[in-house]
Image: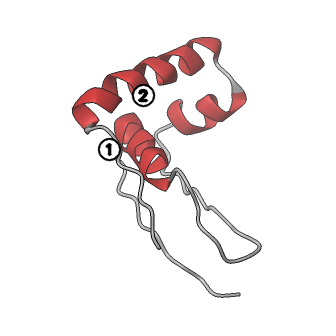
């Protein structure tokens, strides 16, 4: 049996994500500075030590998109 979470539309989520980003940017934390305060292209890599389900990739992709219109590519790699 498979279960899939259904997210609200981006019309609803985008304002929340933007407000959370503004909160982090205002504090100037280390992660936000490395993602936002640069014009250099960045690479994010999620690495799993075992097979399974990675939750939150859809929202993580949207955050990158909101920050800099990034294009996100997912690649599954067998170890």
Residue at point 63%, 61% (across, down): 46
Residue 31 image point, x, y percent? 66, 34
Q: Nearer the viewer, mark 2 or mark 1?
A: 2
Image quarter of residue 52: bottom right
Determine whether, in the image, residue 7 is placed left or right of residue 41: left
In depth, the one of 32 and 19 nearer the eye is 19
Residue 27 image point, x, y percent? 64, 13
Residue at point 77%, 72% (across, down): 49
Residue 6 image point, x, y percent? 35, 48
Helix, strand or loop under label 1: loop
Q: Residue 69: which numbered mark, if any?
A: 1
User: Which of the two discs, 2 and 1, labels the residue nearer the N terminus?
Assistant: 2
Looking at this view, name the residue that lies furthest to the right: 49
Residue at point 41%, 59% (across, down): 4
Dot 2 surroundings within 10 Å: few (below 14), some, or many (20 or more)?
some
Q: Residue 17: which numbered mark, if any?
A: 2
Whether residues under marks 2 and 1 lie with C-beta atoms below 8 angstroms apart, the answer is no
Image quarter of residue 45: bottom right
């Amino acid at each position: 049996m498979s279960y899939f979470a259904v997210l609200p539309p981006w019309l609803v989520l985008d304002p929340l994500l933007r407000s959370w980003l503004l909160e982090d940017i205002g504090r100037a934390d280390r992660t936000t500075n490395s993602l936002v305060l640069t014009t250099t292209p960045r690479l994010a890599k999620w690495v799993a030590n075992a097979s399974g389900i990675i939750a939150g990739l859809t929202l993580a992709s949207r955050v990158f998109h909101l920050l800099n219109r990034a294009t996100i590519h997912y690649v599954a790699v067998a170890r």
